[in-house]
Amino acid sequence: MNLRDYQQPAVIQKVLNYRSVAVVGLSSNHLRPSNFVGYYLKRHGYQMIPVNPREESILDCPSYPTLKDIPHQVDIVDVFRDPAAVPEIATEAVAIGAKCLWLQFGVISEEGVRIAQDAGLDVVMDRCLKIEHARYIGRMHWLGFNTTNISARRAKTFV
């Protein structure tokens, strides 16, 4: 599986224009990456929907045990779970009529991707929704950092 097939800038930019995001595996712990992403999405005008069966409310939003329990439309299903859980989540995303399955850094599931793609969902994998928003729409974009190249290496300079 080539991850770059699921990191296409055109698909990411299209998906960033959707407005409702169910964050599966959102944690109430403020030190967890999922909590920071949920906070960021909410702050930037997205309808952020926590999906965590162990919580009643996260970031002042009601939390749902599963995607099927959400009473309204969901555009993006953003997954912060173990890759083994993704096929079931992808099946639920298809069942609720989501438009995109977004798998965060390190959440890689060929079976989950196949389920989502077979149903016509856009798929983004091994990317962070918050970082991509910042790159294409947020402050990183304003500063010119929308290069599609994430690297800590310094550019070679010729003297």
Image (cartoon, helix red, strand yellow):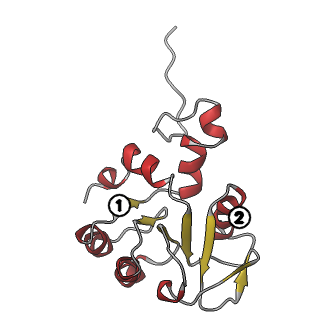
Distance from disc 1 to disc 2, alpha carbons, whole Å, reads 24 Å
Q: Position of residue 58 (x, y in %)?
A: 71, 79
Compared with 127, 9 (above or below) is above
Query: SS class of the residue under badge 2?
Result: helix
Mark 1 is surrounded, within 10 Å at the Cα level, by few (under 14), some (14 to 19) or many (20 or more) other residues, namely many
Q: Position of residue 89 (x, y in %)?
A: 41, 81
Residue at 27% in and 75% down: 115
> Is residue 30 left or right of 92 when viewed as pictured?
right
Mark 2 is surrounded, within 10 Å at the Cα level, by few (under 14), some (14 to 19) or many (20 or more) other residues, namely some
Query: SS class of the residue under badge 1?
Result: strand
Please state which amino acid type lies under the numbered disc 2: Tyr
Q: Which residue is mark 1?
A: 122
The answer to which image quadrant residue 25 occupies is bottom right
Instruction: Quadrant for the N terminus, please.
Output: bottom left
Compared with 151, 131 (above or below) is below
Q: Position of residue 102 (x, y in %)?
A: 44, 64
Are circles 1 and 2 on residues that touch, CB within 8 Å? no
Residue at 61% in and 46% down: 134
Residue 6: which disc? none
Viewer-proximal residue, 11 or 6? 11
Q: Which residue is mark 2?
A: 39
Q: Residue furthest top?
A: 159
| Count of number-bearing discs | 2
Residue at 63% in and 69% down: 48
Compared with 56, 108 (above or below) is above
Please state which amino acid type lies under the numbered disc 1: Asp
Viewer-proximal residue, 131 or 65? 65
Residue at 69% in and 63% down: 42
